[in-house]
Image (cartoon, grey):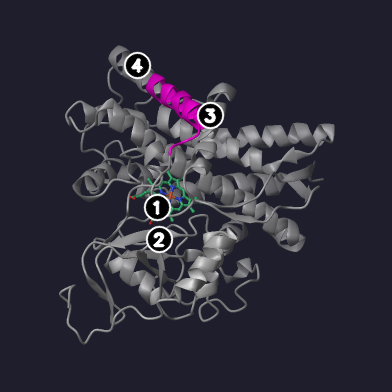
Amino acid sequence: MTDGMHPDVPKLPDFLDDAVVAAWSASGAPLVDLLRQVHTPGRLTGFRRGGRAAVLVTDPRHVHQVLGVGGDRYVKRSHRARPLIGDGMLTATGEAWRSQRRLLQAMFTGRGIQRWEHHIAAAADRVVGRWAERARRGEPTDIAEDVQFFTVDTIWRSLTDRPLDQETYVDLAAVQDIVAALPADVGGAAALPSEVETALAALDERMHRAIAEARGRRTADGAPDGDAPGDGAPGSGASGDGAPGGGASGSGPSVLDRLLGAAETDPAYTDRLIRDELVTLLVAGYESSARTLTWAFVLLDRHPEVMERAAGDARAVEAVLSETLRLYPTGWLLPRQAVADETLDGLRIPAGTDLLVCPYLTHRDPEVWPDPEAFVPERFPVRTPLPPGAYLPFGIGPRACLGTRFAMREMEVLLGGLLARFTVETTAPVGEPVFGINLRPAGPLYARVRERP
Ligand code: HEM
């Protein structure tokens, strides 16, 4: 025994014939094709890639073991988005992550999210206005672009308390080119192409300017109410947590204010870390929501009867979003690494093994979801509680999404607002799913929108 485990515990099963992986690798097919091929419902499947051991995790029980109860033992291998998001909350680990998360948690959970309502409403009004204009002129619109502008606008307003202008939008939305240039799955980051480096520099400048402006406002006006260090800690009470008062728009401090407040007492919050946290929230906060909204329109376009039912019905809109997230969880692959030797489902997992949790495959488990490939929003809200680990569009366990409530709320407001007022008909076929860092539909989504009578 070299790994110090009991010899009776069997080693990972089903290490595939390396030839299978080699054939997949030579084919240039995306990782999802290999995962689909090796996927055995109810079982862990191991394979070796580039000399590293990997395990595909799809069964809800195993998902729960790895992300839920084992959340501290199976950690993120922080790497692939690091050139972009640095040491922000998404890649941070250990005590640094814990304290970063604690600082912002209360702004995004419980009553804390009420502070974002007016930002979400203002950003949604802009899209409704744009569609009204398109409808009047009889011009098609690109839904993928419209919802992306919306989600960048909501997150930018929440970060800085300022509406998004077109110039800033261009610099911020370039993060998708940067993300696309990063390796699409676990592994080391290669050097970035020069145009990506340029986009990264423009983004950095934008962030540092926002930091300098917010700092200037703090000096001129005094710190907004409720951004005292520790105010963001869970259980720190209601002070400044969604309560009106402070902030340029009277809704409590922005995320940037909270970070600048922390920097006054905690030397860990350098401008570099503040920049990283802003970019992290931008990246985590706009892409997934934008792609989910686009997927929702793709699915509704294929099911006009569902679209009609959802018009003016908030509960139906929520169900559409939940079902969209089941079929197309934008975080389709959540990689982890075993810190130490582990036993999972009675099998030995040596330290250093990659565990590839795959919500996309888990969400299509016929044991949990009858007729799993079908779009059936009526599944939600679920009548009988699901097994833990069976539905995880926002992840589960300690590293679950910080922005779950924010995302659901902004998507409900926009989708509900648009469906209540417009009919939507796509004018071009929708591209295939792209399994990159996010799961997104390829290309634009052109549609004709009309005011409802
Ligand atoms: C439909 C929209 C969204 C989806 C599907 C989504 C999904 C996810 C998932 C699956 C994770 C866990 C990743 C993992 O376990 O490896 C995650 C983490 C995270 N999300 Fe979201 N997200 C969405 C929107 C947002 C928004 C709007 C924000 C910010 C306001 C946000 C901020 C974060 C952050 C900061 C993390 C990292 C949390 C941590 O590591 O402690 N997300 N998200």
Of circles 4 and 2, the one toward us is 2
Query: Is residue 202 highlighted in magenta?
Result: yes
Residue 43 rendering spot, x and y as whole percentages? 42, 80
Q: How would you classify the magenta stretch by its main secondary structure?
A: helix
**Which residue is more in the foreground, 192 or 339?**
192
Say what secondary structure mark 3 lies in.
helix
Q: Is residue 61 above or below residue 23?
A: below
Image point 45% across, 23% down: which residue?
Answer: 206
- Residue annotated with mark 4: 217
CB contact under 8 Å: marks 4 and 3: no
**Which residue is more in the foreground, 85 or 224?**
85
- Residue annotated with mark 1: 187
Query: Is residue 385 highlighted in magenta?
Result: no
**Is residue 180 shown left or right of residue 415?**
left
| Highlighted magenta segment, given as a residue range | 191-209
- Residue annotated with mark 3: 195
Q: What's the amino acid at mark 3?
A: Glu
**Which residue is more in the foreground, 367 or 13?**
13
Image point 54% across, 65% down: which residue?
Answer: 24
- Quadrant placement of the N terminus: bottom left
Q: From mark 2 to mark 1, how far is it between C-alphas?
A: 9 Å
Of circles 2 and 1, the one toward us is 2
* Number of other residues with Cα within 10 Å of mark 2, as a class: few under 14, some 14 to 19, many 20 or more: few
Say what secondary structure mark 1 lies in.
loop
Q: From mark 1 to mark 4, how far is it between C-alphas?
A: 42 Å
* Number of other residues with Cα within 10 Å of mark 4, as a class: few under 14, some 14 to 19, many 20 or more: some
